[in-house]
Amino acid sequence: MKTKMQNLAITVLVFTAAVQVEAQGYIVPNGVTYFGFGGLGGYETHVLQNPTNGNYTGFLLSRQSQTTFLFGAFLDEGVRVFQVSSNDPVSLQPILANSYTELTYPNSYVFANGSTFYLGLYTGNTYPQNGIYNDPLFGWAEYVNNNGVIQMLNSALEYGGGGIYAGTENIIGIPEPSTFALFALGGFLFVLRRWRTK
């Protein structure tokens, strides 16, 4: 009987680990908006940091020369901004691995005239602890430097998933146990408890 229970336990654990679904999240409409040259002295981008209440944060790129721009961020919970390429994953893992150059104040960055470039976006509704937001949004924005004028061409922001691939609306899922797997585990624990009481 003990061997049967051990085999059952192993089978249920393997099954539970194997039956996973991915929390996909969703694309937030108007999650990244471009304001052009704003009152703060630079080309402003606003990023939604809370889909529930419509609270935005943002950053700006202030022209220093035709190809050089000073980075500045709003003084709130903020948005972390990274230089990425098309199809790069904008998610926590590469951010924590320092895979991308992070734009920080008061540094200047070069964006070639006439060339498009991508910026990865990472924000949340609360101040980050050790650079990590506990309810994150991940996104990207595609820009072009048009003779010293920064223009946004496209963007996307996801919420509830594990990130997004730059230049796409492909969300990176977060593995989580399916409902069926949780029921199976609950059933196993119930059987195990009844077996031990006999």
Image (spheres, rainbow, N blue to C red):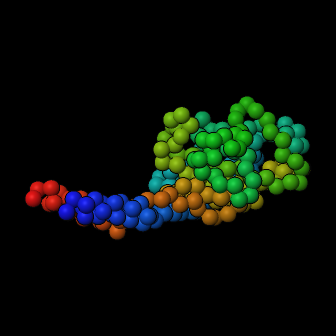
Residue at far bottom of view: 180
Residue in the image at 58% along x and 47% along y: 92
Please say if 165 is above or below 66: below
Instruction: From the viewer's perspective, tell me whether residue 93 is left or right of residue 176.
Output: right
Residue 58 visible? The answer is: no
Q: Which quadrant of the rendered structure holds the C terminus?
A: bottom left
Residue in the image at 28% along x and 59% along y: 6
Say which quarter of the image contains residue 64: top right
Residue 115 visible? The answer is: yes
- The foreground one among 163 and 8 is 8
- The foreground one among 189 and 154 is 189
Q: Position of residue 67 (x, y in %)?
A: 87, 43
Q: Position of residue 166 (x, y in %)?
A: 69, 57
Instruction: From the viewer's perspective, tell me whether residue 68 is left or right of residue 105.
Output: right
Residue in the image at 53% along x and 60% along y: 173
Residue in the image at 41% along x and 60% along y: 17
Q: Position of residue 14 (x, y in %)?
A: 39, 62
Q: Position of residue 184 (x, y in %)?
A: 30, 66
